Image (cartoon, helix red, strand yellow):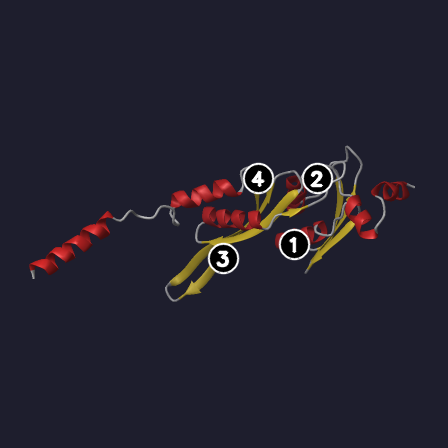
Amino acid sequence: MSTENENNKTEEVAKEAKPKRSGGRGPKAQAKKNEQMAPDFEERVVAVNRVAKVVKGGRRFSFSALVIVGDQKGNVGFGLGKAKEVPDAIRKASQVAAKRMIHIPIENGTLPHTVLGEFDAGKILFKPAAEGTGVKAAGACRTILELAGIKNVLTKSLRGSNPHNVVKATFSALKQVRSVEQVAKARGVDAKSLRLSSAK
């Protein structure tokens, strides 16, 4: 009996002596992850909606946030986050936006060519603009263009005003943008000759 008791005590001491694993999903680990994710990115909240769910005891409120994240160097993304508190919803949306980043080819501070973006009820036209024109856009569309680093552009909303549709229509258009080099490579011609032909 005494031998069994000694063995049990030895096992208990060994369990207690085991070091706890570092990391995990604690607040410190989450904060560290956020710092590593987007050091140079700027984020802007486009829309915050309150959603009410009717249950037996009354209403339960939650919030959804639409956030745009960009580095003003051609990289931009959007994300939608949902939570019971506004700060948590914004944090979740920022994390999603950082994962959904796309790169936009910018030429002399503007878009290389005209492009049309469409999503559901949203439809927006984008045109290149000369130096000094500025960003001729409003609402969520303006936020996306500014965070992408576009300085001069003309836009026209042809349909829809819902911020979610506007954001998705804008990204639909920006995904279609191609630089002169990309077009020249696809056609199998020299980029310089393509520039000269487009200038005529």
Inter-mark Cα distance, 4 to 1: 20 Å
Q: Amino acid at mark 3?
A: Val
Where is residue 15 drawn, in percent x and y?
23, 52
In this view, the mark in front (1 or 3): 1
Q: What numbered label is drawn on residue 51?
A: 3
Question: Which tag, 2 or 3, sits closer to the chain's start?
Answer: 3
Q: Looking at this view, is 18 or 182 the one in front?
A: 18
Question: Which tag, 2 or 4, sits closer to the chain's start?
Answer: 4
Question: Which tag, 1 or 2, sits closer to the chain's start?
Answer: 2
Provide the residue designation for mark 4.
Answer: 41
Q: Amino acid at mark 4?
A: Phe
Find residue 106 and report its image quarter: top right
| Helix, strand or loop at mark 1 | helix
Provide the residue designation for mark 2.
Answer: 150
On the rendered image, what quadrant is the C terminus found in?
top right
Residue furthest top as drawn: 132
| Helix, strand or loop at mark 3 | strand
